[in-house]
Amino acid sequence: MKFVVDGKSIELEKGKNGMDALLLVNEAAKKDVLAYKLDGQEFDLFHPIEKEGKLEFINKDSPEAFHILNHSTSHLLAQAVHALFPNALFAIGPAIEDGFYYDIDFGDYVLKEEDLKKIEDKMKEFSKKNEYIIREVVSKEKALELFKDNPYKVELINDLDGEITIYKQGDWFDLCLGVHVPSTGYIKHFKLETLAGAYWRGDSKNKQLTRIYGISCFSKEDLESKEALKEEAKKRDHRKIGKDLGLFMISEYGPGFPFWLPNGWTLRRNIESWWYDISDKYGYKVINTPIILSKELWITSGHWDHYKENMYTTKIDGRDFAIKPMNCPGSILVYNSELRSYRDLPLRLAELGLVHRHEASGALNGLFRVRCFTQDDAHIYCREDQLEDEIVTLLKLYNLTYTLFGLDYSIVLSTRPETGYIGSIDIWNKSEAILTKACQDSGHEFKINPGDGAFYGPKLDFKLKDCMGRVWQCGTIQLDMNLPERFNCTYIDKDGTKKRPIMLHRAMLGSFERFIGIITENFAGAFPCWCAPVQVKVLPVNNNIHDEFAKKLVATLKEHKFRVELDDSDEKLGYRMRNAQMKKIPYTLVIGDKEVENNSVTYRRFNDEKQISVSIDEFIKLLSKEVEEKTLLVDPKNYKVN
RNA sequence: GCCGACAUAGCUUAGUUGGUAGAGCAAUUCAUUCGUAAUGAAUAGGUCGUUGGUUCGAUUCCGACUGUCGGCACCA
């Protein structure tokens, strides 16, 4: 057999079943090879091959290796569970982005957390045996016979056509496509993490199985660093930081309805104030529409048909009303309230719209998923010839916004679904072309999801990546050919005829609740000076001697609209400094004899031990500049939470 | 909504064959007035989520409810 390795062609003698040849290659390459790729396709090390091609090794350092190892670990888990619970029925056990899981039907037995330890120990036993993981091709009939006692596997097999493969290790075997590590001895450093419920085939009509999540690494260090990353994420949890910093709370009297506390509301007001500024600058007209509107409006918009189960309703004077779950119909009523000329377009109506949606109780999650939230919504009504400019400007605006909060992002374009769409193909094609070009020109990471658009138009989604590498979907830009039709929106064109405007929905932050949750975790609560709830803490060294000066300083800073607090409590300086640092306040000023004498301040910036003395005027200048330039307080990527 | 776990002081939490609870931080008072991440002492603070049941007796065992957490489903 001939392979190309590192650009060189090598010839190998084929062994009994192909594996010897590859083990030879392995030997020759002197690498820790788990599997290989031939012309880009992955194969097990023991998978016999007959053809020539470009051969690449998958060794432990390659990006595919983690996936393969975790997949094999899920098999090891199944082997162990089978040994301990012979009646358990196995469904599916794939590798996922950060580990693996296996969905198992334990019958009437309720698996306990303690059982995980037992299973782990059993897995270690099997790992020590270091059994080969052997791939075998069987006929569909043979497969159905082998798995006849497992209805899940039978269902899977019945959906399969062509080659059916099973993988054997010792006397355990499982239905699987592969690829796997050569033997169970490769699986050494793993942990079973959590138990969860999951519906068979992801359908809530089906039975719920027990899902065991785990993670597997090639070295102890890797496993530990992955665990550490999770610990780090826990420390940044916005629910914890929200409590520590007094940002928000959720009462049991209002599940999913957050309360904003003074610090959180200040933070939000600052972001809102920035949002109003940027909206003015980018030519938006800001409006506000009622949160309760009659049911007929929601019938016209189509929301009633689709989402009535998730809408809160009420009766007023015997007439049915609903609390708005979206702002678009309100915006459209504003658009339709006047006769519009082509000269009026583009009309950009923005709104901080408070919406309510009845989310399932199990979906609620801190500020990330709530039942009442404020969207930074806008609806742009424009002519077809204006669409491109609008999109290009929007992309600029989005870029500026996400950069401001230290968030990386990528763009996903979802295009026309195959069926069930409305509007002319012509407009779909044109707008998709405009969206594609604008995204490509923006130079940002950009992907297309063909057929994933809504029935009423194509959309761009913005996937934000925080410093922990987690991805959040916040911003969207959606073209809508549906609502302008339903509400009969028109404008009078140059030629005096009525035309239908194109409607764009857009939200950058998505919702303030969710977005503040995300940036709380991204910054770990160390918000940039411009939006930080408290910007400056003033600490007099001796509150008998320096208090007067400190109070005057606080008053001066307040005159300059800074958010300042004085801490003249009866505590040592070190203690008060500690508190200020723990509250992640950008600047802590220490006022002692030196400062009083020189009419100066000595400041310490958050997360920095340097002490710098400057005159009060210089400090004001410095702070103003930082607020003006909206500098990040910490680089989220490098900031380690205590 | 579904599967599972959890619920003890403002916060973090200890509390096993069932006999009504301890601690640290925070708070209050007193002393201390201190130069950059925790000064000391004292005091107060708990229907052990709610509610039924078992029991002579329940924070502890069982059930229901509410809420939270980890997932699943859902997310216009």
Image: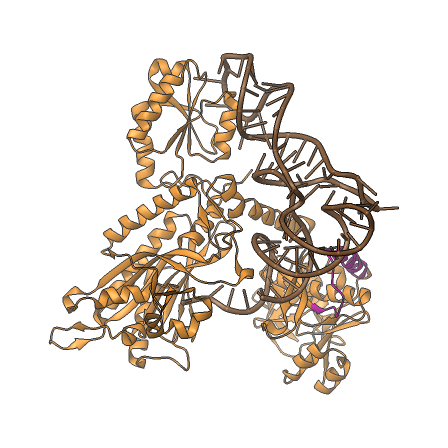
Chain colours: A orange, B brown
- Viewer-proximal residue among A274 and A180: A274
Residue A510 in view, yes or no: no
The quadrant of the picture occupied by the C terminus of chain A is: top right
Q: Which one is nearer the viewer's eye here, A360 or A642? A: A360
Residue A271 appears anywhere in the view: yes
Which residue does the image show at 35% across and 43% down from the upper left? A270
> Who's the residue at 52% across and 47% down the image?
A239
Nearer to the camera, B67 or A338: B67
Q: How far from the left and from the top, in percent, is residue A280? A: 24, 52
Residue lying furthest left in this view?
A495
Please identify the dominant SS of the magenta region: helix
What's drawn in magenta, residue-wise?
A104-128
Query: Residue A126 in magenta?
Result: yes
Q: Which image quadrant for residue A9?
A: bottom right
For residue A304, side relative to residue A287 (left or right): right
Position of the N terminus of chain A, as image quadrant, is bottom right
